[in-house]
Image (spheres, grey):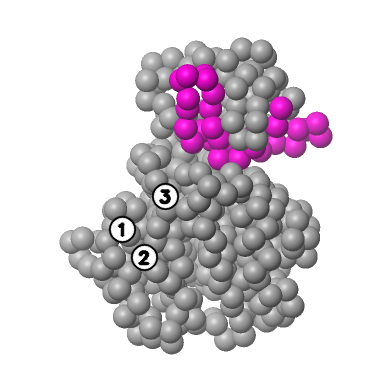
Amino acid sequence: MKVIQKNWTVTEGWQDTKVAVAMPDAHLVIGFGQREILENEARFEEIRAMYPAARIVLASTSGEINDAQVRDESISLTSIAFDKTPLQTVQIDSYQKDSHEVGKELASQFKRESLRHILVLSEGSTVNGTALVEGMHEVLGSEVTITGGLAGDGVAFSKTIVGLDTPPAPFKVVGIGFYGDGFSVGFGSFGGWDPFGAERTVTKSIDNVLYELDGKPALELYKLYLGDKAAELPASALLFPLCIIDGDGQTLVRTILTIDEATQSMTFAGDIPQGCKVRLMKSNHNKLVDGAANATQNSLDILGNHAPALAILVSCVGRKLVLKQRVEEEIEAVKELLGEQASILGFYSYGELAPKGKDTPCYLHNQTMTITLLAEN
């Protein structure tokens, strides 16, 4: 597997991340960029001219990761030529469709023989990530692993865009399938947030919309915790996500996407099951950085003896807002464990997709660092 990385900014145009030769025969190109920049179709045409034979996947972000740098207002581009790994790419339109059905439709279009892994890049404004991956697993079973993330739009929460071989657009979900015994994948996902406040019960919810906690309007109660920051909703909710606790004591973190003053409800990136227990979470800078390192180690452990050529990082926009000028520390923690063996590509997202561990299904996570390592045997 050969990997070449580039970065685009308005002042410098396209620049190689490292000294590199051209690779027009790349099989796959993945690009993450600011929405407004990607909406300029000239950028897509430039990428197509550089990589005429490649499948091109682009997604909008809340920040771009290229090597050990975090940027805004840029495009982070990685081209990959595989030695042993056949690919299949699929794009589904999610407009006014049930997310579970979108997941089933996406998964059903992949050829099943020797399919090892699917990397999913989904629009992040309307898709319910929980239902999306559940629909995929309904078709694929447990044999095919899934990772990926939901596209971002800074802290605007206006619209997100994704595209396969076309300029990216709203309501698109793309899957990249990796095939064959020559391909290996590792993955890990970890948070690092601290719970605080009382444990509360979800007394009314429908899918990913939360209406009541302990019989009280959810948004009203949440605003009490936020205090002065309530005026900055929904962006300020990224600083205080919600932790779901299931009957077995397992946890998942959820971030608010939108609020509805009329119904006093909050819409999350994934399901909030009625009857479950929840607690608010707050940040701890050092634990967030340690969480990135833990995710890296978990992904290396699952990958085993294979040397990763590419690390795809999907971190939550909430982590970026909390870490602020220290945000590159979590990327540096990843790079320290990976060394120079793997190129690093990634973005800050509205949701992360990964299994909790080996031999577990994929889940939607929020406020985590999620890592996918790609290798050829």
Quadrant where the image shows the C terminus: bottom right
Give the residue displayed 43% in from the left and 36% down from the top: 322
Residue 167, numbered circle? 2
Give the residue displayed 40% in from the left and 58% down from the top: 169
Residues tagged 2 and 1 counted as in contact (Cβ below 8 A): yes
Give the residue displayed 81% in from the left and 34% down from the top: 248
Q: Which residue is mark 1?
A: 39
Residue 249, numbered circle? none
Q: Residue 273's x, y, as percent?
A: 70, 32
How far apart are the alpha carbons under marks 3 and 1? 10 Å
User: Residue 90 sits in which quadrant?
Assistant: bottom right
Amino acid carrying mark 3 in the image: Thr
Amino acid carrying mark 2 in the image: Pro
Q: Which residues are magenta?
A: 246-274
User: Residue 327 sits in which quadrant?
Assistant: top left
Q: Is residue 308 visible?
A: no
Give the residue displayed 62% in from the left and 85% down from the top: 84
Q: How many marks?
A: 3
Q: Which residue is mark 3?
A: 160
How far apart are the alpha carbons under marks 2 and 1? 7 Å
